[in-house]
Amino acid sequence: TEMAKIYLVRHGKAAAGFDTHHDPGLDALGREQASATAAALATLQPMAIYSSPLARARETAEPLAHHWNSPIHIEPRVAEIPSPTEDLTQRTTWLRQAMAGRWRDLDPDLRVWRDDLVACLLGLPTDSVVFCHFIAINVAVGSAQDDDRLVVFSPDNASVTTISSDGGSLKVLELGRSAETFVN
């Protein structure tokens, strides 16, 4: 079976937190992180680039897309976990509680979101770079490790977690740099 290597890149540092903005772009540090990650990945053979539709992920993808002269394919299934509320304060409280728990304890809609994300990664036909988010990366790692926790590890901003897919299951090749940062 052909194995696809998938480089999951967490977006760079956002200009605003989860509790203050629905779709922030990157701040100055985030742009530096995006450039540094692009420089590290640019040594690889060019491959398909996918990004969450959220600004912070798209902006993190841009330096690598520019370097490889490649398009960025927007993939809604790798966006951040959908929140049950638009209220930013309530959203943060909900997320903190959810992150301490397990998928089986969450709303079935969120388990469908998780399954769609895993299906998306399993369906990537070739080596790919996917610019996404904290929980999305944890979904991939949790699926690969058969771990039901929402947070299996804490990928740092602009870190690269490498997994593989044989079309039927995911396998962790290398966890990205870890940090004790909260979702941003």
Image (tube, grey):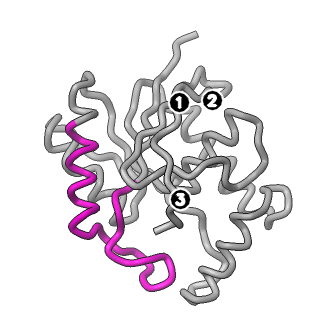
Q: Earlier in the sequence, mark 3 or mark 1?
A: 1
Q: How far apart are marks 2 and 3 (CA)?
A: 25 Å
- Establish if 87 lies above or below 81: below
Residue occupying the point 33% across, 40% down? 49
What's the residue at 47%, 40% (across, down)? 176
Q: Nearer the viewer, mark 3 or mark 1?
A: 3
Q: Are there few (<14), some (14-19), or many (20+) residues within 10 Å of tag 1?
A: many
Disc 1 on helix, strand or loop?
strand
Q: Residue 180 carries which label?
A: 3
Residue 21 place in picture, x, y as percent: 42, 82
Q: Does the magenta stretch include residue 28?
A: yes
Instruction: Estimate the x, y position of residue 150 in percent, counting from the top left.
Output: 70, 55
Amino acid beneath label 1: Ile
Question: Observer-nearest residue: 160 or 179?
Answer: 179
Tell me the crowding category of disc 2: few under 14, some 14 to 19, or many 20 or more residues within 10 angstroms, Cα based. many
Magenta stretch, residue numbers: 11-39
20 to the left or right of 93: left
In percent of width and height, residue 112 lies at 72, 55
Q: Residue furthest right?
A: 105
Q: Looking at the image, is mark 2 or mark 3 earlier in the sequence?
A: 2
Residue at 29% over, 54% down: 60
Tell me the CA gap for discs 3 and 1.
21 Å
Label for residue 170?
A: 2
Q: Which residue lies furthest to the top in this view?
A: 1
Identity of the residue drawn at 55% across and 32% down: 123
| Vertical relation: 114 (above or below) 170 | below
Residue farthest toward the front in the current orientation of the protein: 180
Tag 1 and tag 2, C-beta contact below 8 Å: yes
Q: Residue 163 carries which label?
A: 1
